[in-house]
Image (spheres, rainbow, N blue to C red):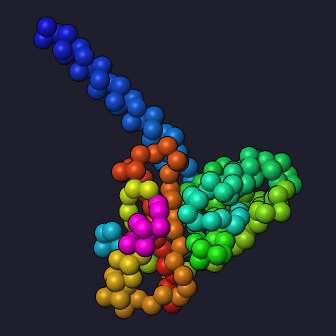
């Protein structure tokens, strides 16, 4: 009986370890991520310096979380829906700039460095644009779970309080970043609120 129990637990552990590493290979660690330099860290808050980044962007309704077709428009671009019919590697994070309920926000994929150096192909879809995300200093808060209006409002409020304590002044609206595929469980997801600084 004890031997059967040991075999059972061994199988469970092996399956668990394989599942974990399988998830790691298909999660954010498998993708190129936008570079930045951490200037100050007080978990969960940071100030960062970002270089200029090239993005492919499209309009989105923030609460739709990509279900309005915005994510698929960008995915089709990296899958070859561009002038060069070039496949472009997926990267992290996906940047989201929400607007008011009556106005479209924006979703953007970061273009890999090698593609940026070679020249970013023009989108085949007129609803997709190539644009520069100007670098600079950002205040950032990191959190887990699913991105939704209530959660990001709370995290943004916490970030702005921290900024106030540190004497940091905002230079624009907030944006959000998601690092994980849709199937990643909430507790393992990496999300951020970013605010550009003066």
Tell me if I can see residue 24 in this picture. yes
Tell me if I can see residue 114 in this picture. no
Residue 111, placed above or below residue 76: below
Of residues 93 and 107, the one nearer the viewer is: 107
Quadrant in the picture for the N terminus: top left
Residue 196 lies within the magenta run = no
Q: Residue 116: horizontal and vertical position, in percent?
A: 72, 62
Residue 152 lies within the magenta run = yes
Q: Residue 88: horizontal and vertical position, in percent?
A: 71, 50
- Residue at 35 percent across and 31 percent down: it is 17
Q: Residue 61: horizontal and vertical position, in percent?
A: 62, 65
Spot the residue most to the right.
83
Left or right of 125? Residue 97 is left
Write down the region rendered in magenta.
147-155
Of residues 122 and 75, the one nearer the viewer is: 75
- Residue at 44 percent across and 78 percent down: it is 139
Left or right of 172? Residue 109 is right
Spot the residue most to the front.
102
Left or right of 141? Residue 171 is right
Q: Residue 63: horizontal and vertical position, in percent?
A: 55, 63
- Residue at 71 percent across and 64 percent down: it is 58
Of residues 6 and 120, the one nearer the viewer is: 6
Left or right of 196? Residue 84 is right
Q: Main secondary structure of the magenta part?
A: helix
- Residue at 48 percent across and 48 percent down: it is 29
Count of numbered badges drawn on the protein: 0
Quadrant of residue 69 within the rendered picture: bottom right
């Amino acid at each position: 009986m004890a031997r059967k129990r040991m075999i059972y637990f061994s199988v469970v552990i092996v399956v668990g370890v394989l599942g974990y590493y399988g998830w790691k290979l298909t999660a954010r660690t498998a993708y190129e991520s936008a570079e930045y330099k951490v200037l100050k860290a007080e978990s969960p808050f940071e100030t960062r310096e970002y270089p200029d980044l090239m993005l492919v962007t499209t309009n989105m309704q923030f609460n739709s979380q990509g279900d309005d077709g915005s994510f698929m428009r960008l995915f089709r671009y990296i899958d070859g829906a561009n002038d060069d019919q070039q496949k472009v590697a997926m990267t992290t994070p996906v940047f989201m700039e929400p607007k008011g309920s009556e106005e479209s926000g924006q979703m953007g994929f970061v273009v890999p460095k090698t593609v940026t150096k070679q020249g970013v192909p023009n989108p085949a879809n007129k609803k997709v644009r190539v644009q520069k995300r100007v670098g600079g200093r950002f205040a950032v808060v990191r959190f887990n779970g699913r991105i939704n209006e209530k959660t990001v409002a709370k995290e943004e409020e916490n970030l702005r309080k921290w900024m106030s304590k540190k004497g940091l002044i905002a230079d624009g609206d907030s944006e959000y970043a998601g690092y994980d595929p849709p199937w990643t469980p909430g507790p393992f997801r990496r999300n951020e609120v970013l605010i550009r600084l003066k």
